[in-house]
Amino acid sequence: MFKWVYHAVRVIFGGWWLFSGLMHFLWPHLQPLGDEKPAIDFTLALMASGLFEWIKVIEVVLGVTILLNRAMPLSIIALVPVNIVIIYWNLVLDTGMTEWTFGILSAIFNIILIWPWRHYFWPLIVWKGRADYGMEPGWPQSPGNPPA
């Protein structure tokens, strides 16, 4: 059952990210700034700094990778920090039922997208690791990639 939930969320969330990213470039007049002054100021500051365009490019790339279900661990690592800001914008800067719904659904969708890939992330939670200062790339061993 969870497999179907995952794929439904992946298609909805990936499609939303792709649409949201493309909307800025194709229909910039539709870009929501928010209703509250802090949300509007924050969005306008991102636009004035040029950072907003980069965010929208990232949204397009992540929307495509999520829709294709490819490079998901890397996509999730890139997605979460951007989405934390989006969730904050929805829950704190621009309050209202629609914004809260989007913020809460974004958090839930992140958790659903992360869960099937969790085994890729556990090794990142290391307090004191062992550095490898060698020049080998360190790719994981697989049947198609035997050790040298």
Image (cartoon, grey):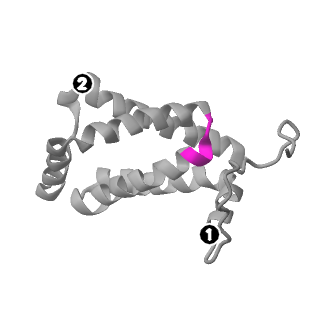
Residue under label 2, please give it.
27
| Residue 77 visible here | yes
Name the residue at 49% across, 40% down. 13
- Amino acid identity at mark 2: Trp
- Amino acid identity at mark 1: Ile
Q: Position of residue 136 (x, y in %)?
A: 70, 50
**Sequence-first tag of 1 and 2:** 2
Tell me the magenta residue range: 69-74
Q: Is residue 112 above or below residue 56?
A: below
Judged from this view, the residue extending furthest toward the top is 26
Name the residue at 71% across, 51% down. 138
Q: Position of residue 17 (x, y in %)?
A: 42, 37
| Residue 125: assigned label | 1
| Residue 108: assigned label | none
Name the residue at 65% across, 67% down. 131
Local secondary structure at mark 2 = loop
